[in-house]
Amino acid sequence: MDWGMQNRLSRIFKAADGHTVMLAVDHGYFLGPTHRLEEPRTTIAPLLPFADALMLTRGVLRTSVEATRDVPIVLRVSGGSTIVGADLANETITTSIRDAVRLNASALALSVFIGSDYEHQTLANLARLVDRGEAAGIPVLAVTAVGKELEKRDARYLALCCRVAAELGAHFVKTYHCDGFEDVVAACPVPVVIAGGPKLETELDALRLAYRAIQEGASGVDMGRNVWQGDHPVPMMRALRAVVHESAKPQEAHELFLELQHRPQSQPA
Ligand code: R5P
């Protein structure tokens, strides 16, 4: 792997444990003003100090994040369909590699919709993006998207998706946790991070999800709604960090979450 590619990946995956806590705030690219992400700047700013990387579109990056912030950017570069359109899977590459370089992206993120009517198109998008990323030294994150069909999230399907994405050259893959997740990770020769999915009932549920994923081989989490749709996003982000980087058990991390609610946000642990 070329030096630039390695260097960018090492900004996202921390050297001490090879893990990452990414903050996903790219939802607006197909959902519009998602609940509690209506004003991206307001949602993102307090969480930035606790994110190993920030996943978002160029529009939100340019308008809502200070260029002086030292956080690796995982730039969402696929899109073109919305939740109110005909088919969420009908995506194209929405950002040029030149613009990604201009934005100093540490990685490029693109969704593939395997098994959908747009399977071929989105896999061809991935292959094209990997070619461009390789030329520029920028790694590619493939997101195994399911659109509205959340029931698709089982190990057999997700293992196929992750493996195909890796075979096409993705440098890391984002998918969902599922029963049999170890098999998904084992069959995927590149690091796997998990999405949180829709907001779970409690923070403890989300911490359990992250814990299981890490125990079963995930290299990190790339969570959004389970962080910023809760009432205490900063304590939740810090509790997630404890699970991912400090091997905290869900209950321990949850105790930290409860304790941090009573501290000023800027106060260190
Ligand atoms: C969805 O396609 C977006 O890429 C999100 O980044 C992803 O789903 C992770 O966010 P959440 O944890 O809210 O599912």
Image: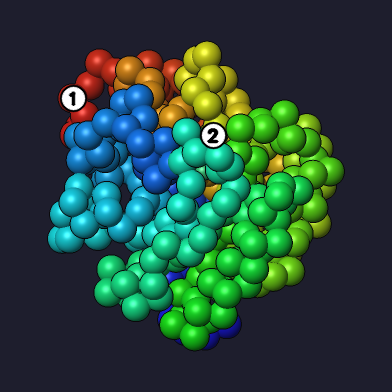
Question: Does 2 appear above or below 145?
Answer: below
Where in the figure is residue 116, as x and y percent of width and height? 71, 47
Q: Nearer the viewer, residue 28 or 44?
A: 28
Q: How many marks?
A: 2
Q: Is residue 237 above or below residue 202?
A: below
Distance of label 1 from label 2 (alpha carbons): 26 Å
Mark 1 and mark 2 in contact? Answer it, CB < 8 Å: no
- The furthest residue to the front: 86
Residue drawn at (62%, 55%), measured in percent from left and top? 112
How packed is label 1: few (under 14 Cα within 10 Å), some, or many (20 or more)?
few
Q: Is residue 28 left or right of residue 117?
A: left
Of helix, strand and loop, which one carries label 1?
loop
Residue drawn at x 69%, y 70% is 168
Q: Is residue 261 left or right of residue 152?
A: left
Classify mark 1 as within 8 Å of ligand 1 or not, answering yes or no. no
Residue at horizontal 38 percent and vertical 20 percent from the top: 230
At which x and y percent is residue 86?
56, 40
Q: Which residue is identified by label 1?
A: 264
Q: Which residue is mark 2?
A: 196
Q: Specify few, some or many for label 2: CA neighbours under 10 Å numbering under 14, 14-19, or 20 or more.
A: many
Q: Is mark 2 within 8 Å of ligand 1?
A: yes
Position above or below: 66 against 190: above
Secondary structure at badge 2 equals loop
Quadrant into which the N terminus falls = bottom right
Query: Which numbered circle lies on residue 201?
Result: none
- Amino acid beneath label 1: Pro
Q: Quadrant of residue 166?
A: bottom right
Q: Residue at image x 66%, y 54%?
A: 118
Q: Amino acid at mark 2?
A: Gly
